[in-house]
């Protein structure tokens, strides 16, 4: 028999859950009523009460580094060491000036770590919250937002490495860096629909999680993270490998503005197109299968 769920939380989290359960103007799920709720209603209810997802995501980070004197900055230290090591090795191999290559690989590794964590954690968003999902009337998309917010907090810790790298070489960002705001918004919108689809699929097919992790490992090497795009030889094959890679476009709308350029029109068009098409598919997908998620858990 499944034991009642217990949430290790502070009073703010418990209060947010209570408010979620008491709001009459929002649609919430239970095992008995899940078939009557559409995907759009579920997502709307989660966004309206985003504070709950934010508190749960913050709690995840706090519990992971509880009693640690450095806390989540251990991730920042590890990332800094990785950037320094890979930057030195690949910068030497490619004979690239460190003042240009190190900021490039710095943003690339930080953002790829963010992308990879979102995808891998997104696969288990429902499975890791199965007890809560079966016993508390919380919208399913809240768990997706919880995963996104947890990894965004970690990104906030890691991104402080970038200005340190710039200061080392006496460089500064320009006004193009403001494009990071819409770029990050579009990237988040894209990964949220990816996480929705993967969470449903991986709940039904558990082996799919391992396949996705392997894909992300390979994706790091075929995406310009540790090598610069202009290093590719000219030709159709090189162009296809670059422009047909969705991760290239996703990372370019953030990395290019931070490095002083705006990114190409193709990058922005592809990212916007992916968001529109992806969410159209995700809404249809979640609407069709969400009533079965609790049975797959």
Image: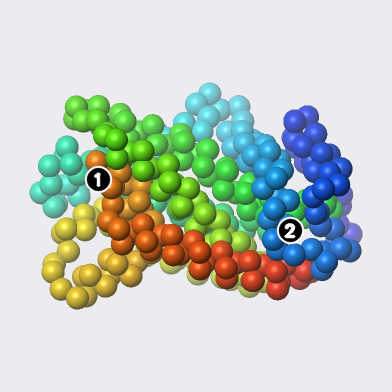
Callout 1 secondary element: loop
Identify which residue is drawn at 86% across, 63% down: 33
Percent coordinates x, y for residue 266 in the rendering:
31, 62
Which label belongs to residue 33? none
Q: Which of 51 and 58 is in front in this view?
A: 51
Residue 100 shows in this picture: yes
Residue 128 is situated, as x and y percent measured from the top left of the image, at 68, 54
C-alpha separation, residue under disc 1 versus residue under disc 2: 39 Å
Q: Quadrant of residue 125?
A: bottom right
Question: In x, y percent, where is residue 6?
Answer: 81, 43
Horizontal side of 19 relative to 112 (left or right) equals right
Outermost residue to the top: 69
**35 over 21 or under it: above or below:** below
Q: Which residue lies furthest to the bottom in this view?
A: 236
Q: Mark 2 points at which residue?
A: 41
Taking 188 as reference, is 18 above or below it? above
Q: Can residue 56 be seen in this view?
A: no
Q: Badge 2: few (under 14), some or many (20 or more) residues near its Cα, within 10 Å?
A: some
Q: Quadrant of the C terminus?
A: bottom right
Seen as rendered, the residue at the extreme left is 95
In the rendered image, residue 77, in percent from the top left (x then y), is placed at: 40, 33
Q: Which residue is drawn at 76% across and 71% down?
A: 292
Point out the tag, 1 or 2, that comes first from the N-terminus: 2
Left/right placement of residue 80 relative to residue 273 reads left
Say which element carries label 2.
Answer: helix
**Residues at circles 1 and 2 in contact by the CB criterion of under 8 Å:** no
**Label 1 Cα crowd, 10 Å radius (few <14 / some 14-19 / many 20+):** some
Total marks placed? 2
Q: Residue 261 carries which label?
A: 1
Quarter that holds the N terminus: bottom right
- Residue at position x 84%, y 44% from top? 23
Q: Is 229 left, or right, of 272 in this rendering?
A: left
């Amino acid at each position: 028999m499944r034991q009642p769920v217990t949430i290790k939380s502070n009073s703010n989290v418990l209060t947010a859950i209570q408010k979620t359960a008491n709001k009459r103007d929002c649609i919430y799920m239970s095992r008995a009523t899940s078939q009557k709720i559409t995907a759009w209603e579920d997502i709307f209810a989660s966004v309206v009460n985003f504070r709950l997802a934010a508190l749960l995501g913050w709690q995840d980070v706090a519990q992971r580094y509880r009693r640690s004197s450095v806390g989540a900055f251990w991730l920042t230290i590890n990332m800094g060491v990785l950037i320094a090591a890979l930057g030195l090795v690949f910068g030497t191999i490619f004979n690239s000036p460190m003042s240009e290559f190190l900021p490039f690989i710095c943003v690339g590794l930080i953002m790829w770590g963010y992308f990879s964590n979102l995808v891998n954690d997104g696969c288990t968003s429902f499975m890791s919250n199965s007890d809560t999902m079966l016993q508390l009337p919380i919208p399913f998309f809240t768990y997706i937002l919880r995963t996104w917010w947890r990894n965004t907090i970690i990104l906030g810790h890691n991104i402080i490495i970038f200005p340190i790298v710039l200061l080392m070489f006496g460089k500064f960002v320009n006004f193009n860096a403001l494009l990071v705001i819409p770029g990050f918004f579009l990237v988040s919108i894209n990964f949220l629909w990816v996480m929705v689809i993967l969470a449903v699929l991986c709940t039904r097919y558990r082996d799919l999680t391992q396949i996705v992790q392997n894909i992300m490992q390979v994706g790091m090497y075929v995406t310009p993270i540790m090598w610069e795009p202009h290093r590719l030889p000219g030709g159709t094959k090189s162009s296809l490998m670059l422009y047909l890679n969705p991760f290239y476009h996703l990372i370019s709308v953030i990395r290019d503005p931070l490095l002083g350029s705006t990114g190409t029109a193709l990058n922005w068009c592809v990212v916007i197109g992916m968001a529109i098409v992806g969410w159209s598919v995700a809404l249809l997908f979640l609407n069709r299968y969400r009533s079965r998620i609790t049975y797959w858990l």
